[in-house]
Structures are given as C-alpha cells and as structure tokens.
Amino acid sequence: MIELHEPHRRSNAVVLIADRGYWPAALFAAHKLAREPDRTFDIILLAIGCSADERAVADTRIEVLDFELDARAKQTSAAKGRSVAVFGRLSLDEVLDDRYDKILYIDADVWIGDRSVSDLFHLDFQGRAVAAVRDAAEIVRGNAGDWLAYKRQLGLHANAGYFNSGMLLINRPAYRQRRIGEQCLDYLSSGKYRGNFNDQSALNAVLAGDWVELSPVWNWMYATRWELTRRVAPAIVHFIGPSKPWADRKSRHDPRFRADMKRVLEPLGYQEFVRDVPALQAARRSVARLGHRLARNLNLDSRDRKIREYVERFNHPLTVRSGVGEL
C-alpha cells in the first residue's frame, strides 16, 4: 500500500501512469489538472522506470510515486510486446491509499480542456463499479461484422456496450467488492485472453456491459476532427492511435494542443518533446481542411454526423446510460 504524504486529505484521486517514453505527456496532463479551480481531487502520477530528476519536476500539488506492475500484467505485456504501463490501471486498487473512494484513471496521451473534472466525482454510479465512455470504434462502426466478432471473442452480447479504458471512473467500494482488477489480471494470465486491446479487452470481458456509460466529452477520441472537437468542447481529449500532437509531422491535430503542451513543458525542461510540424505539410493540411469544411457545409460527412448525433444523446455532460443497450 502506497501512503500519501500530507496535506492530501481528499477522498477522490485522479491517477496517471507513465514510463519514460510518456512521462512528459503525463506531466503535461497533471499540470493542467492541478490548475483546476477548487478541485476536489488529489493528483497522483505513478512512474515506471523514471529517474529522480524526471520525477522531481512535477508541480508540488502533484504526488509522484514509483510504481511496480503486477507480475501477471508484466508477463502479459512482455508476451504482447507492449509497454507495461498499459496494464497498470488494473492494480490501482491495490496500491492507492484507502482514503480514496473514487478514482479517475486517465491515460497519459490526453489534453485537458476547460470543463470541471471535479464534476465527475458527483456521479451516481447506480451501484456499479465503473463509469466509462463507449469506444469510438463502436460508435462509428458498431454493427460491422468484424467488430461484432471481436465482441463475441470476449464473451460479450451484441448489445453489450464496449468502452475505451483510456478514462475510467472507479467506484472503489464496488470495484473492490467485485474484485474487478483481480479478475482482469486472472483473465490476462489464464490463457482465456482473446482481446486485441490489452487491459481494455480484459476489463470489457469481465464487466460484460455492467458499467455506467458517460458522455464522450469525458474521453473524446476524435481529436483530429477539428471543427467537431471545438464545437463539443471536451473535458478530456484522448489521442488514440499512433498519431500524437507532440509528434505531429502530418499536421493532423489542432495546433492549440501542441502550443499548450509547449507552454507547459518547456519551463519544465522538455523543450525537445513537442516537435514542430514541417511548414509544407502544415500548408497542405490547411488546404485539405478547407475542403473538409466545405464538405461539412454540404452535409456530406456522415462520420461527423454519426458522432455528433451520438454526443447529443447525452443532454448534459453528467447524464448517464447503462453500459448495456443499442447504439
């Protein structure tokens, strides 16, 4: 059990986990979270293999702790050739102080917007252990045959919602009572693992639709869709996939993400982490984006329309739905 130092006395925590490769990104997100006015949560960075110098640059309002991954998760990450950090969230209940009743886990590859993250901790879990956001793939192509086949591999019914684990709000008493983390680690090491998405597959298999569904504004997976992203004003933008704003050589992301990261990270000594976009590529992308805007005005972008319609089902950011149900 990791004991936190005074003056941490809140009963809520936001947690990020990072190895050295993602450490600057995690620092950026944590520093943005620390600036939220009247926040009702502690901020904890769990560091995997980071040096003392790297851990020392965090804001004093951020708790930085060394983190050792569960042996079962280590074994699975080695077999899959993935960073051990992607399985760390499964062990959070075992390592965090008992004072935390609600834990918000966030992946390191995110941008924190202007909505109050503290609002999430007022959520009614309806007795469930986890609240999350439906995965982007399911929203866009949830009835596709290959997607339904993947869900069947996990033992999920076609109508069982499938969430993205890059943001998880954990109701700790229920999570602990049901041994969710322990069940997931057992699943990964048992030979039953059939998933494509590491711990996300395990969590979905174990919870089997028994989770609270949140609005996509809390885990926005459409960061390259500039206009839609600006209109929705997400609380947490999640840069899924290989394209990240700090290494955006194809100029896919809104420049404000990169500029915000530079502003926060350069004073911390990470001047080289956020790379510049080649000027020619930026110009080409600007022209392509103009064409996309014209297409939107002609109502030709069915993908944007599908995403927007799904977001509008949540008439308030804290509206919740059962994780089981039709798209």
Image (spheres, helix red, strand yellow):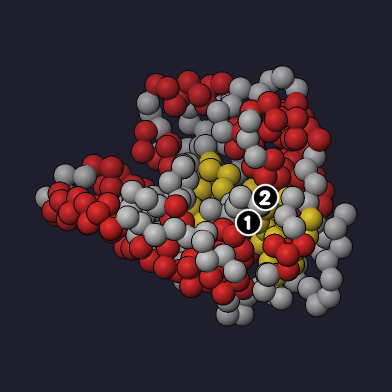
Other-residue count near label 2 (Cα within 10 Å), few / some / many at <14 / 14–19 / ≥20: some
Disc number placed over residue 254 in the picture, else none: none
- When the figure is inspected, residue 175 is found, relative to residue 256, above or below; the finding is above
Foreground residue, 262 or 45? 262
- When the figure is inspected, residue 219 is found, relative to residue 141, above or below; the finding is below
- When the figure is inspected, residue 318 is found, relative to residue 85, above or below; the finding is below
Q: Residue 121 sits in which quadrant?
A: bottom right
The residue under the point 42% across, 68% down is 259
Image quarter of the C terminus: top left
Type of amino acid at the residue the image marks with label 1:
Trp
Q: Please state if 33 lies on the left or on the right of 54 as rendered.
A: left
Q: Please state if 58 lies on the left or on the right of 264 as rendered.
A: right
Q: In this rendering, does residue 12 appear at all?
A: no
Residue assigned mark 2 = 19
Q: Please state if 188 lies on the left or on the right of 119 as rendered.
A: right
Foreground residue, 52 or 234? 52
Q: Secondary structure at mark 1?
A: helix
Q: Position of residue 147 (x, y in %)?
A: 44, 26
Residue assigned mark 1 = 23
